[in-house]
Amino acid sequence: MTIDQLSIFVENSPGRLAEIADILGNAGIDLRAVSIADTRDFGILRVITSDPARATEILRAEDCVVSVTPVLAVAIEDTPGSLSRVLRVLADVGISIEYLYAFITRKRDSAYVIFRVEDNERAIEAFAAHGVKTAGAAELYAL
Amino acid sequence: MNYYQSEMECASPEAMRALQSERLVKAVRHVYDNVPYYRNKMADIGLEPQDVRSMDDLRKLPFLTKDDLKTAYPYGLLAKPLADCVRIQSTSGTTGKRVVAFYTQNDIDVWDECCARAIVAAGGSREDVVHVCYGYGLFTGGPGLNGGSHKVGSLTLPMSSGNTERQLQFMIDLEATILCCTPSYAAFLAESLIAQGLRDQIKLKAGIFGAEAWSEEMRRDIEDKLGIKAYDIYGLTEVTGPGVSFECSEQTGMHVNEDHFVAEIIDPETGEVLPDGSKGELVFTCISKEAFPLLRYRTRDICVLSRKECSCGRTLVKMARLMGRTDDMLIIRGVNVFPSQIETVLLRAGYPSNYQIIIDRVHHTDSFEVKVEMTQEMFDDTVKRIEAREAELLSALRAMLGISPKVTLVAPRSIARSEGKAVRVIDKRKI
Ligand SMILES: [Zn+2]
């Protein structure tokens, strides 16, 4: 299963990030996870939200550039070594990772890792073969 | 291959140069004797008419600019008694005042012949029906092509501009074969024909389009939509009107009618004459005109001249499509940069043409930044792919401009616009 992540172009200017956060906040969009990739010139804000379709619509209406990318969410135990175990699964079948970020939840004693890989199907198979479950939207948003 | 005046259009370079020399000497004498304004300009630099003995001396002559036309308005550059003039044409000058040009009957004949060359180069003959929907009146477009079509002996439809329904009706009913208008009007007519399902009822084979800047992409679009060959034509009222140069079957630039109009390319900053193939400001010297013979008139148009052999057989020098105006030119790190070049690169690479150039001087060096608005299409969720696109854009800009800007991607619609028009250039340098 994949979930939809929003990637938002962030112009490299003071306050731009806060503006985007305001747009989402004012619209009542709840953020499950947030990560930012930044370069010298610009940033990409990546968010997992409970309503990606509506968030996209709202952001685009405010002239933000947004893309929706299917990514994988994997629940891992909040213990040492658990991240390396899932990374090993992908490495062993030669799937390279574009980027990843993790977030912990309060409700459960676990963390989620968001993976952006080239080939979601193959990654899901590899995870399944090793008993690693990918979380669907329902599970993630219910947190 | 058909020519209207092959002896001129295909003359040997030596013969052409000899003719130009002979005509130039006469033209200099003519303005010196008849135009006090010009005589004073020559006197200012200590130049006598006998100092100009051949084309080699052309560069000794002072330049004329739009400001001279403004100062001398309306009769100050007239070289014939008004009684000898039969026509005026006029254009709105960029400097505010209108430009008024005068013509004797001979001037009109020469102009018409120049346009006739363009029509023949586009495949026209007395069998053709030439549909002219450039404006008639003070604007040179209509009268120029109308006169050219008469010279060729084609049936001329003096449609003038506007009234699209009537244009289409005549085009179809009278079986027009050659269309003369601005490229944007041609594109509009093409769309209208297609929208009304009339596309297969036209007999057009060629179009002669000028009086405004257009791109190669636009040419292909018009050609596909109308099923014709589209030819560029160039001219300006100050020099004569359309027909100063025209395109041939090769469609790679416009042959200058240099038996009448001598073209030079100069460095717009220094006025130095540049060799063929260099990019610079186009300067024209009218060597056969009687009433309004401007010598070394600076057009402010930027282009390149080429003497490469042309497959059409004409030996007339060719000028490339215009690359911009000197008014828009920026000098960055000593290199001439035109905003239009940046626009071309952006459009080719799929970015919106809403860009902004920011120039500053940091530690005695020019900083040069191009801000480009990010689009939904160009965006990606990975830094790697955005940076790869950025790098492609940068190398395309470097190839076009000869220097490297810093490219900054900005949010859509974030580039400042004043009254709906974007501010393209911000030059912060204090020099
Ligand atoms: Zn040619």
Image (cartoon, rainbow, N blue to C red):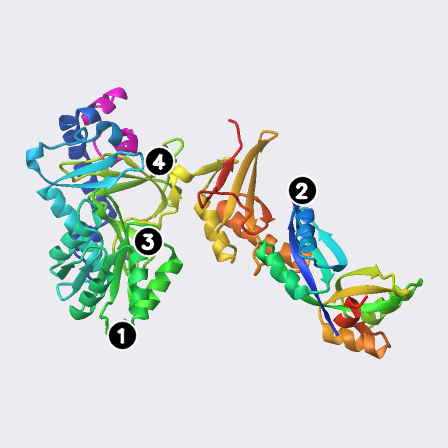
Image quarter where the N terminus of chain B lies is bottom left
Horizontal side of A6 relative to B235 (left or right) equals right
Mark 3 Cα shell of 10 Å, populated few (<14), some (14-19), many (≥20): many
Residue B264 lies left or right of residue B167; in this view the side is: right
- Residue found 18% across the figure and 66% down from its top: B170
Which residue, given by chain and number where applicable, does mark 2 sit on? A14
Q: Position of residue A109 (x, y in %)?
A: 91, 65
Tell me the distance, in whole angstroms, between the alpha carbons under discs 4 and 2: 48 Å
Q: CA distance from mark 4 to mark 3?
A: 21 Å
Chain letter for mark 2, please. Answer: A
The spot of residue A40 in percent (x, y) is: 68, 46
Q: Nearer the viewer, residue B253 or B199?
A: B199
In the rendered image, the vertical position of residue B128 relative to residue B41, given as above or below: below
Q: Which residue matches tag 4?
A: B273
User: Would you say the residues marked 2 and 3 are in contact, meaning their CB atoms lie under 8 Å apart?
Assistant: no
x and y, in percent, of residue B316 in the image: 26, 50
Q: Which residue is mark 1?
A: B200
B122 vs B88: above or below: below
Q: Are marks 4 and 3 on the same chain?
A: yes
Marks 1 and 2, how far apart in space?
58 Å
The answer to which of B59 and B137 lies nearer the viewer is: B137
